[in-house]
Image: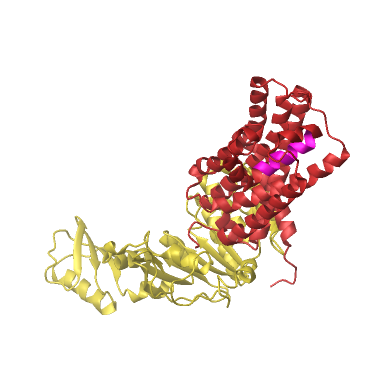
Amino acid sequence: MTAAVLPGTAHNGLARGRVELLQFIRDRTAVIFTFAFPAMLLLLFGTIFGDSYEDTGVSVSQVYTASMIAYGILSTGFITMGSGLAMDREDGTLKRLHGTPITATAYLLGKLILVLVLSVAEVTLLILVGVLVYDMPLPDASHWVVFGWLFLLSVIACTLCGIAVSALVKRARTAGAILNVPLVALQFISGVFIHPITQLPSWLITVASLFPVKWMSQGFRYVFLPDEMKVYEAAGQWELGRIALVLGAWCVIGLALCLVTFRWTEKDR
Amino acid sequence: MRYGATTAVDGVSLTVPRGRVLALLGHNGAGKTSLLQVCEGFRPADGGECRVLGLDPIRDHDELMPRLGIMLQSGGVYPWATAGEILRLFASFSANPLNPDMLIDRLGLRKFERTRFRRLSGGEQQRLSLAIALVGRPELVFLDEPTAGMDTEARHTTWQLINELRTDGVSVLLTTHLLDEAERLADDVVIMRAGRVAATGTPAELTAAAGIDLLEVRADSGLKSESVNYKVVETSPGEYSVTGALDAAAIAEVLTWFAASGAQVTAVNSRRRTLEDVYLALIKDNKAGAVR
């Protein structure tokens, strides 16, 4: 026995996060389909829908840019984490790690680092497309503060939900199909693909309001669009307090679900 | 231990003393890997008790893992990371790891250090997997078929490393299908059949307990063997193979029989039974007993 102290959770999580990032960057398929897809979708939508909102001077493309930031985070956090975890469980990565001093928290911290870095890159890319291609003006400092907490709450909520949902994925090759169903459905009802959201039946807006995507996209529209655009939101207001409340609640729900559903191997429960 | 209605491991009792190597033998589905998984804390036992270094592998998992080295049969390594990156990552989880560079050199992985795991051959992946198991300076090592897929040189290096572990007081529990490997490495052998222990002992005890040696006799051809108490088979003209409970008196009796038959005996060779002979005899009676 040695008197040396075992490395802590933060150290192990960071070490794993570094290898997770190397893994991701070297897998070109993952880079193209996970990372570049939202930007490609934004370019496509921006090209198809070139109109402007009356009396505001805001183009549909600029609205899409703001809303697609929510999609980018959702895609990176929910899909990358959900399918990545299912893959790690199936190919024995989790099992091998479980046979080392590493804890579940350190493992998940490594994944969270991957998602955080990817989300920063993803959002940067989408903002660049918005600014360079669609002349979207950058917000002032107070809006960037909102962007900061909104971004963090969004990443954490989506990541935790991705971890929780991965427990439902029996085989890694079906992960994409399973995870994309809620992802695509939520985008259609949450004001990401269809804006203004008031075009939808009120009961559908109520359903969307239960999930984080509606609040994420609304928040990013607050950050990047002029104040007069709030009239196109469901409540006619930006509702920043409610956005923080719902996303915070989803962080707590996601964490609780993770603690209940996380398993190291396919058969350990 | 059960999988649905199938009992994979049943009533197995074994102990690995400190600084000894125990080889777990058995055909595919005999329950070796299932037993290892219980000891490694990957699965709970449905009954009985498992203590590893005095700890419960499930309940005391966090306390136990820093003291164990686990080599899985396959899988679980980042395919896009290089061999060097992977080994250094696993080393970084330990309080006082071995120098990864030393292990890379010892296991002949230096020229693959910058090769991504997915590009390594099966034998190279096995060597890296062994390095991962050893890098944390474990007190007890579980090796599931450690030399499967390795070339001859790598296999000998692995055997040497396992011998060094024993010298350093590390306990080793390994599974293998290579009986010469078990005979060469193990202090103790447990042969499993259909989830139960079929035989246990040191390799010498197991081969001696069989009580049968093979006698190869060269003599005149065409002798009939009905009149002798041992099984005499003429394997080729003038070459006889004698099997049975061949102690000194029996060998004298066999040679007397050759002389009485008027045969000129020109050569006699005795061969001690190997662990493989013992193993094959043990599992022959229960081919249908495979469970998983």
Q: Horizontal and vertical percent for residue A234?
A: 68, 39
Q: Is residue A239 above or below residue A69?
A: below
In terms of secondary structure, what is the magenta stretch mainly? helix
In yellow, which chain? Answer: B
Can you see residue B271?
no
Q: Which residues are magenta?
A: A214-225
> Looking at the image, what colour scheme do you see?
by chain
Q: Quadrant of the C terminus of chain B?
A: bottom left
**Image quadrant in which you'd find residue A185:** top right
User: Which residue does the image show at 78% across and 34% down from the upper left?
Assistant: A224
User: Which residue does the image show at 48% across and 58% down from the upper left?
Assistant: B145
Direction from residue B220 to residue B192 in the image, left or right: right
Q: Horizontal and vertical percent for residue B47?
A: 43, 75
User: Which residue does the image show at 45% across and 67% down from the upper left?
Assistant: B35
Q: Is residue A16 above or below residue B199?
A: above
Q: Nearer the viewer, residue A118 or A251?
A: A251
Q: Is residue A49 above or below residue A82?
A: above
Direction from residue B277 to residue A115 in the image, left or right: right
In red, which chain? Answer: A
As for residue A223 lying within the magenta part, the answer is yes
Q: Is residue A25 above or below residue B64?
A: above
Q: Nearer the viewer, residue B89 or A170?
A: A170
Q: Quadrant of the N terminus of chain B?
A: bottom left
Can you see residue A146?
yes
As for residue A126 lying within the magenta part, the answer is no
In the rendered image, the residue lying farthest to the right is: A141
Q: Nearer the viewer, residue B95 or B41?
A: B41
